[in-house]
Image (cartoon, rainbow, N blue to C red):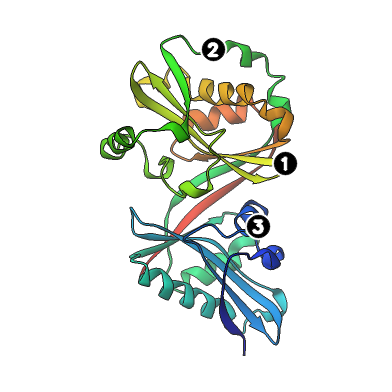
Amino acid sequence: MAEIIEVKESALAFLPLVSPHVAHLLDPLPAGFIALAAMADGTRAGFALANVNAVRKEGIVHALHVMEPFHNLGIGTRLLMALEVRLREKGCITIIIDVVEEPSAVESNSFLKNRGFSLQSAMYRMFAIRLPMIMQEPWLDLLQMSESFTLFPWGELGKEEREKILLSQSYPDELSPFVEEGMIDPTYSTGLRYGDEIIGWLIVQKLASNTILFKSLFVKAEFQHTGRSIALAAEVICKHSLADKYPYLMLNVNNRNRTMLRFVEKRLSNSLLRTKDFVRLQKLL
């Protein structure tokens, strides 16, 4: 019988049990994260990782995996149940998990649906991009910000400005700049002002020594038709010489954002390494 234990401070020993885009969360474990391990006679049999979105009262599962020799022994179910208990204790009313939509994921998706999860929506497409190749694109030099727009480090966002953004709700939930704030890179994450008004942001995370994630790229609707979101990303890449520091860029684009999807697939086709589609499953706790 496997024992379910809580992992503290570092979960680096469980690196083989998580996807590469989650690896940066293991050491050290970010504040507020819940890490559970299934141990069978001293062997690492399974692992689960989640955190809490306090604003939406939801638990977000980043990893749930059982090693193949321990399949069909109920370990995945026990890990999930233990995770749900801890999330309820932290005030969560729902639990969500994003899963890749491909044939190899059919078994894991069925596992979740058999335990009360239902499809919430087709969420986003994940692009893996060769960042240095973007610098060779001829359209890059055309994306210049006029003097009416100014960029600022996101870490300099004032308290009153933060409250104003939260109250405005002018952005989709998945593009909130305030989710998992302890994980963002304060140097690269950037806000965009038009005059004195904050109209957008690019929130950046370091996933590995060679990979960064553009986690949240948002510009208010009235500025989107002028390509300001692409210009913001280009400014950050050039200003911080990201292409010289990181060979790879991960970019998640919501399926509802057809304009951005078309841009990436057409304008960045030479830079694309791979794409994956993700769907979101949800369960009431």
Which residue is under mark 1? 210
Front: mark 3 or 1: 1
Q: Are marks 3 and 1 in contact (CB under 8 Å)?
A: no
The foreground one among 253 and 151 is 151
Q: Which residue occupies the foreground of this view, 30 or 171?
A: 30
Amino acid found under the numbered disc labelled 3: Ser
Q: Quadrant of residue 222?
A: top left
The residue that disc 3 covers is: 19
Q: Earlier in the sequence, mark 3 or mark 1?
A: 3
Residue shown at 62% from the left, 26% from the top = 237
Give the x, y percent position of residue 44.
Answer: 69, 76
Q: Which mark is residue 123?
A: none
Q: Which residue is mark 2?
A: 144
Q: Mark 1: which secondary structure?
A: loop
Of callouts 3 and 2, the N-terminal one: 3
> Toward which corner of the image does residue 282 lie, by quadrant?
bottom left
* Three-letter code for the amino acid on which mark 2 is drawn: Gln
Counting residues from the start of the chain, the first of labels 1 and 2 encountered is 2
Task: Inspect this view and state whether residue 203 appears.
Answer: yes
- Real-space Cα separation, disc 1 to disc 2, in angstroms: 27 Å
Crowd tier of the residue under label 1, counting other residues whose Cα lies within 10 Å: few below 14, some 14–19, many 20 or above: few
In this view, 121 is above or below 229: below
